Amino acid sequence: MCLSRLIFLFFMSMCIGHVQCSPVTNHGNEVFGDLYANAINYAQENPETLEAILTFDKAIIEGDIIMPSDRNAVDAVWPAVNGKVHVAFEIHPDLVNMKDTMLKAMDMVSEHACVSFHKRSTEPDYMLFYPSKGCASYVGYQGGEQILYVGPICNVGNVAHEILHALGFHHEHTRLDRNEHIQVIESNIQTGRHSNFKMKDGKTFGIPYDTSSIMHYGGKYFSKNGLPTIKLLKHGSDMGQRTRLTPQDMKRIRVLYQCVGTGEMDDKTSKEKEDTFLKMFARLKRLYLHVPGVSANLNTYHPFG
């Protein structure tokens, strides 16, 4: 059965359960047309929830986090070599048409941290992008073949979100300090999905809560009626965005993987080099203070524009 029909049947089951499905008309064909359109719109806006909704053979929490068979397994970081993390990957042949999506997602993550990705040769530990209905991943390093599920509706940002799960990061909205920033509206959450919004103790690395994080739920995730399941307590945030890593997202990766030579370290190094050059330039001007021609040129030269 094709994905669109599965989504439609799920949406129908919600309506049969007396869930509000708007808009509703008095004409049967229009009703089914509206329901189908709503189902497709929901899927396109919330692809990270589809694996939980449409899959019954995997233990999934929070929509896209796969529970390992060993429930006592501890989340772990991928091993580093000489201060760099090199993650091998394979892309399943059935995802060849989405290869560019996965490559761009890996670039989005590696651009800002000491984590890089390369095509697997013989590495025993690797990330396998595998076809499925939605987007889903384990959290943290599992060892061996580690599957990251990619559905046909998953975009670059969705896949980057799952890669960050695989690197060891949880959803932002489950932080213990979330109630200072968002309001979870329990009455709008689908039956049986309330646990997806449960707060959990975890590492925050002292980094402030980020409603714009690529790891934050969108406002209507697991909505049963098209109304918000999460509301911002402050305006001006693009909550649930999947277009970029925020500065806080980048910092989390650098802190967890103890990156050196990226991000803030680069900024610090550049500032130190600039200060050193300015000191040397000032010394040069003093040395040639009384040399005709040279002194005038040095006084009109500005090394940084």
Image (cartoon, grey):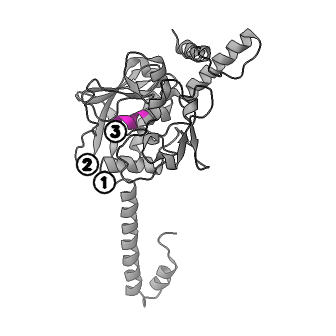
**Mark 1 residue element:** loop
Identify the residue at image location x=50%, y=84%. 296
Label 3 to label 2: alpha-carbon separation: 17 Å
Pick whichever of labels 1 and 3 is earlier in the sequence: 3
Residue on which disc 3 sits = 168
Q: Look at the image and tell me whether residue 14 can be seen.
A: yes
Q: Which is nearer the eye, 214 or 88?
A: 214
Whether tag 1 and tag 2 are in contact, CB under 8 A, the answer is yes
Q: Is residue 114 above or below residue 98?
A: below
**Mark 2 residue element:** loop
Hey, which quadrant is residue 137 in on the image? top left
Pick whichever of labels 1 and 2 is earlier in the sequence: 2
Residue on which disc 1 sits = 260
Mark identifier at residue 83: 2
Hey, which quadrant is residue 271 in on the image? bottom left
Left or right of 16 in this view: 72: left
Name the spot of residue 220 as percent of width and height, x first.
57, 33
Q: Which is nearer the eye, 231 or 165?
A: 231
Mark 2: give few (<14), some (14-19) or many (20+) Cα within 10 Å.
some
Three-letter code, disc 1: Val
Q: Residue furthest right?
A: 26
**Mark 3 residue element:** loop
Left or right of 24 in this view: 208: left
Label 1 to label 2: alpha-carbon separation: 7 Å
Q: Which residues are magenta?
A: 162-166
Q: Which is nearer the eye, 254 or 185?
A: 185
Q: Is residue 35 above or below residue 241?
A: above
Name the spot of residue 106 as percent of width and height, x first.
41, 36
Three-letter code, disc 2: Gly
Mark 1: give few (<14), some (14-19) or many (20+) Cα within 10 Å.
some
